[in-house]
Image (cartoon, grey):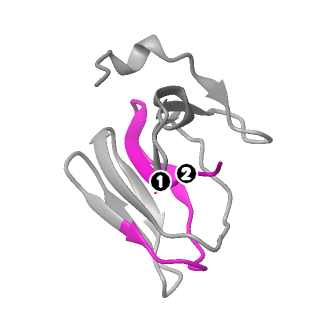
Amino acid sequence: MRTFHYTDVAPTPAPGLEGVTLRWVLGENVGAPHFAMRVIDVEPGAATEHHAHDWEHEVYVITGEGAVLDPEGRETPIGPGTCVYVAPNEVHRFANTGREVLRFICVIPNPA
């Protein structure tokens, strides 16, 4: 068992995305064989790109206000306590629409 604060893991910039950082808090660093947990920060006015991938992921919003692109192409508001399930191959995007950092936990299959 390992315990630590998420800020003990250094944030890394999301490739090609201004104002988006990721912390790979659980995964390869603890020897997790199946899943990886990331804490993602999206600065005010920033967003992830519209994208899809072959795996699902689960999201839990910790702080901030934003919007997520839903399967019908609408932007659905999200905030603290919001849970989001993104199915495999579903186009999605997370945008910060507020004045503070949009921070969420994202769990995906271990990329290793």
* Residue carrying label 1: 34
Question: How far apart are the two marked residues, 2 and 1, measured between alpha carbons?
Answer: 5 Å
Q: Position of residue 63 (x, y in %)?
A: 29, 36
Contact, mark 2 vs mark 1 (Cβ under 8 Å)? yes
What is the x, y in percent for residue 8? 44, 11
Determine whether, in the image, residue 46 is placed left or right of residue 44.
right
- Three-letter code for the amino acid on which mark 1 is drawn: His
**Mark carried by residue 110:** 2
In the image as oriented, which residue stretches furthest toward the top? Answer: 8
Q: Position of residue 102 (x, y in %)?
A: 41, 39
Find the residue positioned furthest to the left.
81
**Magenta stretch, residue numbers:** 85-112
Q: Nearer the viewer, residue 25 or 82?
A: 25
Instruction: Estimate how packed mark 2 is, as few (under 14), some (14 to 19) or many (20 or more) residues with alpha carbons within 10 Å.
Output: some
Q: Is residue 108 magenta?
A: yes
Give the vertical position of 50 relative to 88 (above or below).
above
Look at the numbered disc 2 and give the secondary structure of its residue. Answer: loop
Residue shown at 27% from the left, 50% from the top: 79
Residue 95 shown in magenta:
yes
Image side of residue 31 versus residue 62, left or right: right
**How would you rate the neighbour count of disc 1 (Cα within 10 Å): few for under 14, some for 14-19, many for 20 or more?**
few
